Structures are given as C-alpha cells and as structure tokens.
Image (cartoon, grey):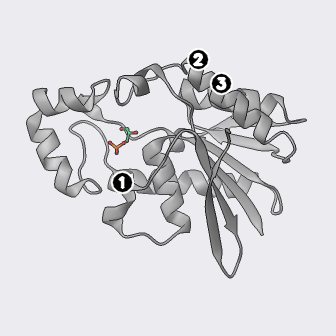
Amino acid sequence: VRNLFLVRHGETYYNREDRIGGDSDLTDKGLEQAHALAEHFATVRIPIIFTSNYKRTLQTATPIAERQDPCSIIALPEFNEIHAGVCEGMTYEEIRRQMPHVAKARGPNKYRYVYPEGEGYATMEERVHRGLKKVFFLNNYDENIMIVGHRAVNRMILSCFLSRQEEEIPYIYMPQDRYYHIQIDPHKRLFELVPYKN
Ligand code: G3H
C-alpha cells in the first residue's frame, strides 16, 4: 500500500475575497495552516513534495519540507490551477455582474466549460495526468507521496483515483483545513479526509 497525501494550499488573500486565479500570497492564517501541516507530518517520511509554480503552494510546502530530513520540493507546471482566462483575478460576484454570459454558461456545465482565453476542467485533464505520471516516475516505488495543489487541480487528481462522474468532479469538497489521504493498493482504493488542526 502506498500513501498519497493530497493537500490544498493554505488560505490566501485572494481566497479571503473569493477571488480566483492570480498568484496571491498566503495570509497569516494560511501560514499557520502550513505550520500545522508541518507539525502533523513531522513523523511521516515524505522525501519529495510536489507543488505547482504558484507561490501559495510553495509557501505551504516549505515549512513541511523544513521539518523533514531531507526533503525536496519539485514544482510542476502541470499542477498549476485552472487558468480562468478573462476572469483571472475576479470574484465570483464580479463575474456574475460583469460577465453574466460566463456565469450562465459555466453553471450548468462546469466540467466542460472553458473560460474565454483560459481553461476548463476538461481541458486541464491531460496536463494533470501528465503531472501525475511525472510524480510516479520521480518517486521510488514504496515512498509516500505528497502533492500540494489547488482546488480544481486537486479535484482532478482525486478523480483519477476514485471513479467519479465527470459532472461531479468540479464539486468535490476540497477544504483548506484537511487533506485527502489516498491509499493506493493494486486491488482497492481507500481514501479519507483528514483534519490536521484540532
Ligand atoms: O478557479 C479556481 C478555483 O479554485 C476553482 O474553483 O472550479 O469551483 O470555480 P471552481
């Protein structure tokens, strides 16, 4: 059995405003979450942490890596968050008001919808799979794996291990105060949502 720890980055300034996209930093609360994760995983051996290229995943992974001995962080562009194109940096409320056509078209078909000049869940699928192949190639067979990703990317990753209907994927619960622990076994897939803060 192999362990995959799928973590979402801690709270960012954009998260606080319900803003999507961008490359926001972690808030103090986000940094606290990163340190709580570091404490939580201090006795679990994690030789490599995979992140995206965005600051929020690197800032979450850094304290965790510092508690490990040794541990490297590998940033993969394949795990960058869904690119919201013309909606990058907007809040969902601003999208509803300023681009009602986007909100209207995305609502009923969230998986297939592609943001103008950006991506959609469906168009992200191939690159996320490519990222996962790299992860399995770079880790030794019996080592624990940690990925610190984003809401949409983590939903895609989780859906690779659990069979989910396409239309359910964009709604998978992906909170910032707990992580998914996926046990990869040749015969079965087990997963649990683990809180890391009491
Ligand atoms: O756009 C970035 C969000 O983290 C993805 O969330 O697909 O539920 O809008 P959403």
Q: Is residue 8 visible?
A: yes
Q: Is residue 7 visible?
A: no
* Location of residue 159 in the rendering, given as x and y in whole percent from the top left corner: 48, 63
Disc 3 to disc 1, C-alpha distance: 27 Å
Q: Residues within 10 Å of mark 2 (few under 14, many from 20)?
A: few
Mark carried by residue 28: 2
What residue is rendered at 58% in x and 39% in y? 177
Pick out the residue farthest to the front: 198
Residue under label 3: 32
Vertical side of 174 occupied by 140: above or below: below
- The quarter holding residue 196 reads top right
- CB of mark 3 within 8 Å of CB of mark 1? no
What residue is rendered at 71% in x and 41% in y? 49
Q: Give amino acid for label 2.
A: Asp
- CB of mark 3 within 8 Å of CB of mark 2? yes
Point out the quarter of the image occupied by ligand 1: top left
Task: Quarter of the image for the N terminus: give it.
Answer: bottom right
Decide if ligand 1 comes within 8 Å of the CB at mark 1. Answer: yes
* Location of residue 105 in the rendering, given as x and y in whole percent from the top left corner: 13, 48
In this view of the protein, which residue sits in the foreground, 113 or 192?
Answer: 192
Q: Is residue 64 left or right of residue 109?
A: right
Q: Give amino acid for label 3.
A: Glu
In this view of the protein, which residue sits in the foreground, 12 or 110?
Answer: 12
- CB of mark 1 within 8 Å of CB of mark 2? no
Quick one: label 3 or label 1, which is nearer the N terminus? 3
Residue under label 1: 170
Q: Residues within 10 Å of mark 3 (few under 14, many from 20)?
A: some
Pick out the residue farthest to the right: 69
Pick out the residue farthest to the bottom: 187
Question: Could you say whether the residue bearing mark 1 is in a helix, strand or loop?
Answer: helix
